[in-house]
Image (cartoon, rainbow, N blue to C red):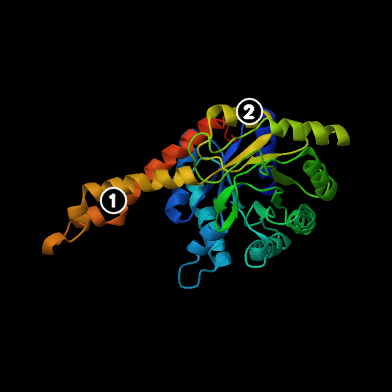
Amino acid sequence: MPIATPEVYNEMLDRAKAGKFAYPAINVTSSQTLHAALRGFAEAESDGIIQISTGGAEFLGGQYSKDMVTGAVALAEFAHIVAAKYDITVALHTDHCPKDKLDGYVRPLLDISAERVKAGRNPLFQSHMWDGSAETLADNLAIGQELLAKAAAAKIILEVEITPTGGEEDGVSHEINDELYTTVEDAIRTAEALGLGEKGRYLLAASFGNVHGVYKPGNVVLRPELLKDLQQGVGEKYGKSSPFDFVFHGGSGSTEQEIATALENGVVKMNLDTDTQYAFTRPVADHMLKNYDGVLKVDGEVGKKSTYDPRTWGKLAEASMAKRVTEACANLRSTGTKLK
């Protein structure tokens, strides 16, 4: 069962929260990066999460049509087949989807999974993200209520981002400033609108100074201890200990101490994209620069086929990205925690 069933995905998240570890959620944009992520999880003996952003799905859909749903469905179906060769369990997730892309991405994917469930099958994806951080909190949560109901009916977990994450991802950007911190009031309003599990399970991407991408020290001030305040503030109001399953966005470049503090306060999923992109590309650049006279037909020569064969540099890229995934598993304490 390499692709988690809804029941197993819930078990994965419960185990992470109880054990104070988190799953790396690795963005993929190709069959090759998918294999790199799966390989990294397998080598770390960790379960994990594979995710596709709107930009990733558009890329996967091909530059002729750039259809996001086609791209996401195609890679998900591919993953259901190839993941069977890896001795770990993964969940499939769609990353950041803003309001103007819901009708072209998350809503159709929810409908596809709803039809699968009606036919007695499992959903195609195990979770979807609604990124309403650019909207007012009231509008964000209103749309979240609609999507949560649809997700729950299709046995899918919803991820919501209630306040902004800094930087830019797939065209959605926010300034790096003092607004990047979720308040207890924001969290209480979220619980009032979405419940605490009785309306459907959701993951909460709260903001504690998170920024997409990697920035030099001093540019970003993370306060993962803020998550404890949110857990306590809502927990006291509703009489529920540690009520939220948190997501750590902008995880690339974070320190081990920042990650450890986030894990202690209920983070069960951490997104990685920038670091794994670099890990994938770095050996390719090295190969091209060292073998420029082989990959290029310089001065009328014919080059060297074995150097420009995509399999040659592609294997290097896969191995490098897989290694970065294993490092993420170690940082998030998920190494060796795979379901037996």
CA distance separating discs 2 and 1: 40 Å
The residue lying at 14 percent from left, 62 percent from top is 302
Name the residue that disc number 2 marks. 261
The residue lying at 29 percent from left, 45 percent from top is 286
- Based on the displayed image, in which of its 4 quarters is residue 258 positioned? top right
The earlier-in-sequence mark between 2 and 1 is: 2
User: Tag 2, which secondary structure?
Assistant: helix
User: Tag 1, which secondary structure?
Assistant: helix
85 or 63, nearer to the observer: 63
The reply to whether residue 32 is visible in this rendering is yes
Label 2 close to label 1 by CB (< 8 Å): no
Q: Nearer the viewer, mark 2 or mark 1?
A: 2
Query: Taking 212 as reference, is 234 left or right?
Result: right
Name the residue that disc number 1 marks. 312
Q: Which mark is residue 334?
A: none
Query: Taking 132 as reference, is 259 left or right?
Result: left
Q: Where is residue 24 in the image (x, y as percent from the top left)?
A: 56, 40
Q: Position of residue 318 (x, y in %)?
A: 39, 46
Q: Position of residue 312 (x, y in %)?
A: 28, 51
**Crowdedness of circle 2 by 10 Å Cα count: few (<14), some, many (20+)?**
some
Query: In the rendered picture of this protein, how many numbered marks are placed on residues?
Result: 2
**Crowdedness of circle 1 by 10 Å Cα count: few (<14), some, many (20+)?**
some
257 or 287, nearer to the observer: 257
Which quarter of the rendering shows the C terminus? Answer: top right
User: For the residue marked with disc 2, what is the amino acid?
Assistant: Thr
The reply to whether residue 239 is visible in this rendering is no
